[in-house]
Amino acid sequence: MDWMQALDLTYFLLVTLGVVIGIIFGAIPGMTATMAVAVCLPMTYALDLNHGLALLLGLYVGGISGGLVPAILINLPGTPSSIATCFDGYPMMQKGEAERALKVSISASLFGGLFSAAVLYFFAPTLADWAIKFSYVEKFLLILFALTVIASLSERMLVGIFSGVLGVWVSLMGVYDTSRGGNGELRLVPEALSPWLENGFSLLPVLIGLFGLGVIFSEAEKGVREDSDGSVTLKQGKPFSFSVFKGQWGNLLRSSSIGTFIGLLPGVGGSAASMMAYSQTKNFSKEPETFGTGNPAGVVASESSNNGLTGGALIPLVSLGIPGDSTTAVLIGAFTLQGVQVGPLFIGENPGTWNVMMVGLLVANLVMFLVMFFAIRHIAKVIMIPKYLLYPGIMMMCVVGAYAINSGIMFDVWTLLLFGLAGWLAPKVGIEVAPFIIGFILGTSAELYFVKSLEAFGTLTIFFTKSPIAWFLWGLIALSIGYSVYNARQTRRVAARVAA
């Protein structure tokens, strides 16, 4: 087992470092797991793929888990995936059960993370073996399905479609590569920019700009005034005991399954997972009226589901090459730096890296539990770190990282700034960042598969007559679009009732 040689002391130290930094990012409102991975991505430039993944997986798990701290202590989710944790976590804190609520959340997070890792290990290779049989036609339809899923689960369907298509359009800027069936001519950009945009925008500065610099600009707009006096105290009310999970195993399994399944759907995100798990737990409860008043079951549902998202979102990434959420979209950057292509062939061609990933995910969840469970009183103070001290350092890391990624190209720094501004302005004009970035990542592949299909068969009808798999994918696309229309109508009906 040559891959076990990668599991040296440095590997485990990097996982631990990633978890700790991720927890800090997740625990500070406004900073997310995606931002943590994007900002630290350039650090992997000096590491090999296995050690780089150790750091990034630690950041991913720690960032998702860290969001529970401010959700419980100050009723403000540190990450979008912790929004439902506020509903019962904060009332528990108000009743003097802050430490109990935190430790219940941490324990549920561990279960959700380990559950999704197990699903990832057993399901991803099977899905990859199935996807290997895809021709260019099926690969194009698979990407089309991913884009329709993004649209159907966006808050506004047409906005989701537009954001995804805009991402595809931006990804096609540059020379129309002859290897993709093109003519070698520059397209979609002015001739004056051809020296820099011949190969389009580099992926990594785009990612860091949208999820790193964009967040900093948004937070800077709100101001850096600190309302707290810098002190955090955890009142000791009802003590924590693992007996709280008695009768919660159904809740844990259901919520972790929901989180893992939501992770499979591109661009949906942890907030949808936690809200769906919370509502289902409330529906199945014999005492639904206790939810929102400090019921530990609500905290268990939210945290097990949003950590279940981690393994679930990695499934389409490693088996299909399609990121499950914005954070795994950033993880593609780590593979890009090392020249590794994720997709159906990844597991078969890189079994060592696959095993190292699984060990990293397992260790990251265990380290997250140990660090947060036994040091929660100290971690709770993280939410009081002044942002005016954090953001200049993070901004510097973004600039240096973007400049160094392609061995010192200044245009990458301008790309960072451009997409940082885009990340700040996008919510103001209604553009959704997650569909945009997934469209940007998948755009060139969609073009390649579409053109190669036409080259091979010469007619558009091939997309409808190729194989049973193609018809199955068309069925999924139709269901996705149908759900979009149904959801939009339901939203309008609810809005009409409220207005009446």
Image: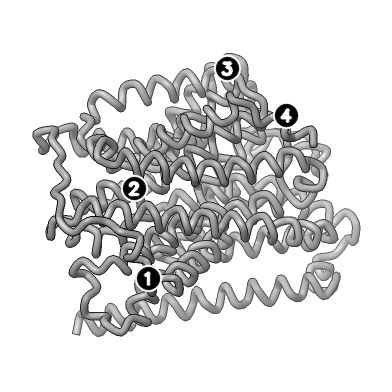
Q: Which mark is residue 409?
A: 3
Name the side, left or right, on which 68 lies relative to 187.
Answer: left
x, y (%) of residue 227?
10, 38
Q: How many marks?
A: 4
Between the residue at mark 1 and the residue at mark 3, the CA separation in whole angstroms equals 57 Å
Q: Say which label, 3 or 2, has the lower sequence index.
A: 2
x, y (%) of residue 164?
54, 54
Q: Say which label, 1 or 4, has the lower sequence index.
A: 4
Q: Nearer the viewer, residue 356 or 476?
A: 356
Provide the secondary structure element on which disc 4 rests.
Answer: helix
Mark 3 nearby-residue class (10 Å; few <14, some 14–19, many ≥20):
few
Task: Kindly identify the amino acid type of the residue bearing the numbered disc 2.
Answer: Gly
Task: Kindly identify the amino acid type of the residue bearing the numbered disc 4.
Answer: Gln
Q: Residue at x 54, y 62 (%)?
A: 260
Q: Nearer the viewer, mark 1 or mark 4?
A: 1
Q: Say which label, 4 or 3, has the lower sequence index.
A: 4
Task: Kindly identify the amino acid type of the residue bearing the numbered disc 1.
Answer: Lys
Name the side, left or right, on which 10 lies relative to 449.
Answer: left
Q: Nearer the viewer, mark 4 or mark 3?
A: 4
